[in-house]
Amino acid sequence: MTGGLLLTLRHHGLFLTLTGTFFCLAVLISTPSLAGQQGPAARYIGSRACRPCHKKEYASFTKYAQKSKSYQSIERLKKGLSKDDLKKCYGCHTTGYGKPGGFISVEKTPGLKNDGCEVCHGPGSIHAKTQDPAAIKSNLTRKDCEVCHISARIKAFRYTPLIHGGGH
């Protein structure tokens, strides 16, 4: 073959042989940021998965942060609640409820039954696997807290919000 670049590459288990202009086109199509493709979505894995690398933060979180024991509030009040009311509680008292890989039930997802690290920092499977700081949310804002800590809930449940007090 003359006048062109010949390249064989492996893409998703297939070997592709590309030449000249077709090589450039294939690179553009297979580049995730250009093709609109994304990698696998991060999944919830529970706070215990954070402990090996973040020992000090994990110890502080489990000792001082009330949210690390948030499911106890549901257990205390569940006798007087309907199933629908309970589901409303799960959104702020468990990790990832209603989201892919999030809390389903104490039996099916016991490691997600309390508010854990991932409530604030997002699903941690990719971060835990790659240890890439960019794979987890680290610069939290008041808006992140206000997903659950809204004025109506603060008044209704008479708790003092510890926004930016930190869990660790």
Image: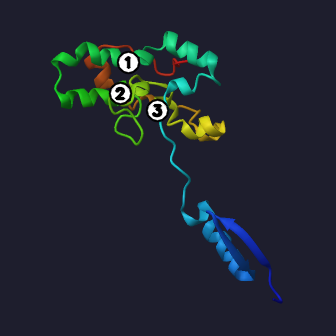
Q: Which residue is mark 2?
A: 92
Q: Earlier in the sequence, mark 2 or mark 3?
A: 2
- The percent position of residue 108, horizontal first and vertical second, equals 36, 31
Q: Is residue 109 visible?
A: yes
Specify the amino acid type for callout 3: Asp
Helix, strand or loop at label 3? It is: helix
Specify the amino acid type for callout 2: Cys
Please state which of the two labelled residues, at mark 2 or mark 3, is closer to the viewer: 2
**Mark 1 and mark 3 in contact (Cβ < 8 Å)?**
no
Q: Is residue 43 left or right of residue 20?
A: left
Q: Residue at x 40, y 43 (%)?
A: 100
Compared to residue 126, the image places residue 151 above or below, namely above
Q: Which residue is mark 1?
A: 70
Query: Which class describes the residues within 10 Å of circle 2: few (<14), some (14-19), or many (20+)?
Result: some
- The percent position of residue 133, horizontal first and vertical second, equals 65, 36
Q: Answer with the quarter of the image where residue 138 lies.
A: top right
Query: Which class describes the residues within 10 Å of circle 1: few (<14), some (14-19), or many (20+)?
Result: many
Specify the amino acid type for callout 1: Ser
Q: Is residue 129 left or right of residue 47?
A: right
Identify the mark at residue 15; answer none if there is no mark: none
User: Outermost residue toward the right?
Assistant: 2
**Mark 1 and mark 2 in contact (Cβ < 8 Å)?**
yes
Q: Earlier in the sequence, mark 2 or mark 1?
A: 1
Please state which of the two labelled residues, at mark 3 or mark 1, is closer to the viewer: 1
- The percent position of residue 1, horizontal first and vertical second, equals 81, 89
Q: Which residue is mark 3?
A: 144
Q: Is residue 28 left or right of residue 69?
A: right
